[in-house]
Image (tube, helix red, strand yellow):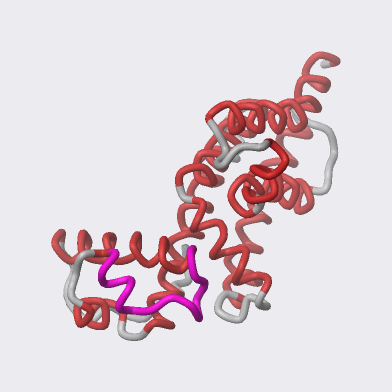
Amino acid sequence: MTETLSPPHRAGPGAPRQAAEAAILAAAERVFGRHGFRGASMNEIACEAGVPKPNIHYYFGTKEELYRSVLENIMTFWLQDADYWLVPERRAREGFEGYIRAKMAFSRERPDASRIFAYELLQGAGNIHHYLSTTLREHVARRARTFDVWYRERQMPAIDSTHLMFAIWSMTQAYADMSAQMTALTGHAVLRDVDFEAGLQTILRLVLGFCNDIEDRG
């Protein structure tokens, strides 16, 4: 990434610092996920992380800076997945399948992260608007170049790359953002292994179907 959303660190790098920051970010992700930005408190985040509250202020300064760092951490993971899977060196089917599996695993393992991002967007994306219009736009443009290669090689049909990414994000992140609706409809307290697997296979069939069609006709 060429842009950072968090403030410069106040001390030099090192393994202990990285471990402390990672523990705080993970705790903050859970607390912000439960309560949103306004409902979360630094005291609760400190308790969740198992560190004194002054440690959080030392590493991240303010609650706002910690929140932006959590958002940056979430988006870094998402962009890394696409940069790994959706590249011209892979076959289209392999790339889409790997990326969709990674996105579904993220929604399953870190639902709070997805909800924080969704909440930020619903609030107007004030903390990440510049990031969305620069770094994320450039990221999607790189995916478009990959899809152009796959199209020329007859691995996939011509399709609007931006809206294809919108569709994949919407389908996979729904299993975190809309889990309350899904559990109500399935009649279970939480989404089960079988629910995630059924969702994964459904999304794969929808996306990989056009890849198979093109390859079969080729």
Residue drawn 15% across the image and 59% down it: 15
The structure residue drawn at horizontal position 68% and vertical position 56%, both measured from the top left corner, is 141
Residue 103 percent location from the top left of the image: 56, 43
Q: What residue is shown at x 78% (from left), y 25% (from top)?
A: 209
Give the answer, above or below, for where 87 lies relative to 71.
above
x and y percentages locating residue 119 in the rendered image: 61, 68
Q: Quadrant of residue 60?
A: bottom left
- Magenta: predominant secondary structure element? helix
The residue lying toward the viewer, choosing from 110 and 93, is 110
Q: Is residue 51 left or right of residue 179?
A: left
Q: Position of residue 99 (x, y in %)?
A: 58, 38
Is 63 in front, or is 186?
A: 186
Q: Where is residue 42, by image quadrant?
A: bottom left
Residue 151's image quarter?
top right
Task: Quarter of the image for the C terminus: give it.
Answer: top right
Numbered marks: total: 0
Drawn side of residue 120 relative to residue 45, left or right: right
Residue 95 point in image, percent of width and height: 60, 32
As for residue 54 lying within the magenta part, the answer is no
Question: Of residues 213 and 68, which is closer to you in this image?
Answer: 68
Q: Which residues are magenta?
A: 34-48
Q: Residue visible at 81% across and 14% down? A: 216
Front position in the image: 25 or 195: 195
- The verdict on residue 45 being magenta is yes
